[in-house]
Amino acid sequence: MPRLKMSALSRDLLLRGVWDALGTPECFVTGGYVRDRLLGRPTVDLDLVLPGTLEKARGPARRLAARLDGSAHLLGRDDKRVWRIETPALKVELWPLGDLDLERDIHRRDFTVNAVMWRLPDGPLIDQVGGAPDLRAGTLRAIRKKNLQDDPVRLLRAARFLAQFPGFKIDERTAAWIRSLAPRVRRAPPERLGQEFLKLVTLANRRRGFEAMLDLGILRHTVRPAAAFDRPWISANLDAVSRLRHDAHPLRTALSEAGDAAALAFLLKASGSPHPDAVAPFAWPRTLRINAAQAARNLDAALSAVDGSPAERRALIHRAGTAFPATITLAAAVEPDHEWERWWRQWREHGAELIEPAPLLAGEEIAALLGLPPGPALGRAVAALTDAQVRNEVRTRGGAVRWLRAWFEENTPRLWKN
Ligand code: CTP
């Protein structure tokens, strides 16, 4: 059982500086800052609680911002408005208590370990929910079921904290609450869920996070439609999540380029490989979202192409496009005992020309040759020729003309469908 480092708060120079700058009669620090400092971990995320209104917190927020060389801005909506000060080194939020008293503020939080307060500047530690003993014991315990109900993002936060704090176990009653509330994850604002996923997949111990999501029954409700959730697949492939670490991945350069997208792709694959648009509300950066969704969809093709012909691998690079690094990173983690290195080299050396090969014939030439007007049929002809080119089946203009004529003859009846 680790001893808690009380001196990390009482001798914290940052907290002292913050207190001096605020100039308020009363202020408490809480949340992750207190939790992490008591565990002896570094943290740059400071949550402050101030009695009084949002308006009353304006002065302290401005003074603190001036001291930190940053600026204070308002964030959030309705009764959840806070002042935020962000500098390259630190993120501070000032939460006005408004109509709440300290006790109610403590009891509306998610987990006991997140609800311990330290009164600035010299204490005491205010622990009304047993957060300090839980921290010592490594127990993640929800304050009450209703708090999980009120904000279903907290269900996913539980999995993230279990991954973030190795050795922590979830309290059994909390686990039972989460299992019973798991379908509510669907009601959580997708944007906030997306942020939690991002935090979870970038943790070194992301395997623990995935295991916890699976065990607590959350994973199946995270991506819609949940009906497509593939529990046997994810259980069989959990080792892949461990391999998405530098010391364990067969292709380290690929991992450093596309590790986060590959971890998200794993999540999406487990959830039935939804289309990139279906995960748009998660508000992941656009390229990350598209690469993760494409990699999930390409995974099976990549696994069968790795031992296939060079033409098959070239065609897959072409189809995967910029999602190829995430695809190969995930595929190599799922089945490490293949020749991934060679395929990766092919991408490094020829990726650009395989994604966008210089056309052998212009669109108008193909239209004239086949007598096709602009439209879907012509589009299919262009795509088929490009695919043949990528596979090295056609290399010259003359070859392209011959190939297209043969292809057209074979495909004419099908071309006009849809
Ligand atoms: N909180 C909560 N429910 C949430 C989000 C936050 O109860 N859905 C409370 C918790 O007390 C939490 C604090 O607000 O500790 C600060 O939240 P946040 O900064 O999001 O997380 P931290 O707990 O500080 O953890 P981390 O910095 O590791 O994300």
Image (cartoon, rainbow, N blue to C red):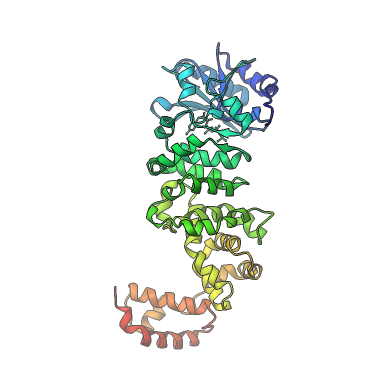
Q: Picture quarter containing residue 350? A: bottom right
Q: Nearer the viewer, residue 372 or 355?
A: 355
Q: Is residue 20 above or below residue 375?
A: above
Q: Nearer the viewer, residue 276 or 306?
A: 306
Measured from the top left, where is residue 272 in percent x and y? 43, 58
Residue in view at x 53 percent, y 20 percent: 128
Measured from the top left, where is residue 347 in percent x and y? 60, 68
Q: Quadrant of the C terminus?
A: bottom left
Counting labels gives 0
Q: Is residue 8 above or below residue 326?
A: above
Furthest residue in direction front, as rendered: 172
Q: Is residue 104 above or below residue 331?
A: above
Furthest residue in direction top, as rendered: 25
Residue in view at x 39 percent, y 41 percent: 184
The reply to whether residue 339 is visible in this rendering is yes
Q: Nearer the viewer, residue 103 or 68?
A: 103
Q: Quadrant of the N terminus?
A: top right
Q: Is residue 77 left or right of residue 43?
A: left
The reply to whether residue 356 is visible in this rendering is no
Q: Is residue 300 above or below residue 91?
A: below
Q: Is residue 190 left or right of residue 50?
A: left
Q: Picture quarter containing residue 349? A: bottom right
